Amino acid sequence: QVTLVESGGGSVQAGGSLRLSCVASGATDRIYYMGWFRQLPAKAREGVAVLDDDNNRTRYADAVKGRFTISKDSAENTLYLQMNSLKPEDTAMYFCAADIYGGSYSQGVDPLGGAVYNVWGQGTQVTVSS
């Protein structure tokens, strides 16, 4: 099994930066895709950024392109999300997730959609004030 633990959330003013971390432990060699998702209370979860663990290809939601960067440190089994130029609308609970069955590679599946991720962290809160 794989376990994910996020950290790095906090409160910042608009225009500021935060870096989220997600440490993976357990059977990390089973991971196909990893990603960051966010959710507000009573709202649907949305994909923020995802990374193919095999070739490091990345995808971003339009709302964060040019401001957020997803990356990983394979030696430390850690996924990062560098968030710059933060806006109040980025305020949300951020979750790290992993696809350990390869569903992200299925035809027609959008890895940003979140449906194929099987393992989720507990979340870390990001609050951006104006």
Image (cartoon, rainbow, N blue to C red):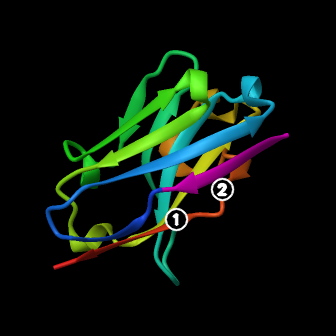
Label 2 with label 1: CB-CB less than 8 Å:
yes
Which dot marks residue 121? 2
84 drawn magenta: no
The image quadrant that residue 126 belongs to is bottom left
What separation in Å lies between label 2 and label 1 (alpha carbons)? 9 Å
Decide: is 40 above or below 23.
Answer: below
Visible residue check, residue 110: no
Which residue is located at x 46 percent, y 76 percent? 40
Q: Is residue 57 left or right of residue 130?
A: right
Q: Which residue is mark 1?
A: 124
Residue 94 pos. (x, y %): 49, 62
Which residue is located at x 59 percent, y 21 percent? 75
The image quadrant that residue 130 belongs to is bottom left
Residue 79 pos. (x, y %): 52, 38
Amino acid marked by disc 1: Thr
Q: Which residues are magenta?
A: 1-7
